[in-house]
């Protein structure tokens, strides 16, 4: 394999901008990515047609530039991972320090 290229699985969640688009419309071709397999429900579709419409829950096994595949993944919001900070009860901390 060439440096910077690899194989990865891309998941198409509900609400993704790729839902309703064909594989060709999803810019996969423009980014020089090859879709090797489409997983839909319990079915495995090797070498899917480019006019196949993507649905929520689909998984695409792709080969191509890793950087191009990373660009297809939406940025995660850090708010979801940030824990809620809670105030400490000063009465509890005062009794523990005695």
Image (cartoon, rainbow, N blue to C red):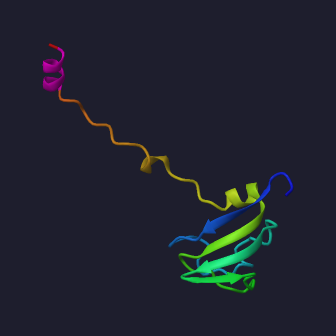
Observer-nearest of 41 and 79: 41
Q: Residue at 77% of width from left, 66% of height from top? A: 63
Residue 97 x, y percent position in the rendering: 18, 15
Residue 23 x, y percent position in the rendering: 71, 78
Q: Is residue 22 above or below residue 78?
A: below
Q: Residue at 74% of width from left, 54% of height from top? A: 67
Q: Main secondary structure of the magenta part?
A: helix
Residue 94 within the magenta-colored segment of the rendering: yes
Q: Is residue 89 left or right of residue 20?
A: left
Query: In which image quadrant can residue 21 be found?
Result: bottom right
Please provide the residue range marked out in magenta: 90-97
Residue 50 x, y percent position in the rendering: 75, 83
Q: Residue at 74% of width from left, 74% of height from top? A: 35
Q: Is residue 79 left or right of residue 61?
A: left
Residue 88 within the magenta-colored segment of the rendering: no
**Residue most extreme to the right:** 2
């Amino acid at each position: 394999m060439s440096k910077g290229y690899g194989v990865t699985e891309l998941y198409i969640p509900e609400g993704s901008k790729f839902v309703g688009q064909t594989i060709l419309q999803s810019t996969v071709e423009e980014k020089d990515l090859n879709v090797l397999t489409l997983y839909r429900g319990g079915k495995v579709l090797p070498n899917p047609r480019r006019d196949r419409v993507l649905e929520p829950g689909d998984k695409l096994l792709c080969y191509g530039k890793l950087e191009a595949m990373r660009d297809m993944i939406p940025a995660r919001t850090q708010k979801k991972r940030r824990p809620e900070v809670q105030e400490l009860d000063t009465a509890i901390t005062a009794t523990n320090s005695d």
